[in-house]
Amino acid sequence: MSLNYREKDALSNHIILIFLTLVILIPIIILLFNSVKPKAEFGFSPLGFPNEIRLMNYIFIQAKLVTKPATGPIIALFKQR
């Protein structure tokens, strides 16, 4: 069973779209993994899964944003909460 021209074109388009999706999603996933890692774990596996999920990183940055004066529009949005 051979593919006609239109099916081959659709298949190549899907392969390109899957590749581009991975190129975009992988850095976002790495960013999320790194946001819940403790500082000491960055040196051991900067691209791997976190051994320990630490949500205190988010609490720490939120407390830091609230106690400091607003220096930009994003920090001002956090301060309004």
Image: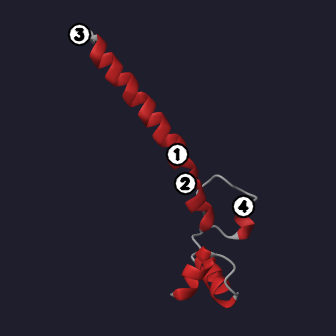
Mark 3 or mark 2: which is in front? 2
Which type of secondary structure does the marked residue at label 2 adopt? helix
Distance from Cα at disc 3 to Cα at disc 1: 34 Å
Mark 3 or mark 1: which is in front? 1
Q: Quadrant of residue 41?
A: bottom right
Depth check, front residue: 43 or 23: 23
The residue beneath circle 4 is 42
Q: Earlier in the sequence, mark 3 or mark 2?
A: 3
Furthest-bottom residue in view? 67
Q: Position of residue 3 (x, y in %)?
A: 27, 12
The residue beneath circle 1 is 24
Q: Earlier in the sequence, mark 3 or mark 1?
A: 3
Q: Position of residue 78 (x, y in %)?
A: 56, 81
| Residue type of the residue flagged with mark 2 | Ile
Depth check, front residue: 74 or 24: 74
Q: Earlier in the sequence, mark 3 or mark 4?
A: 3
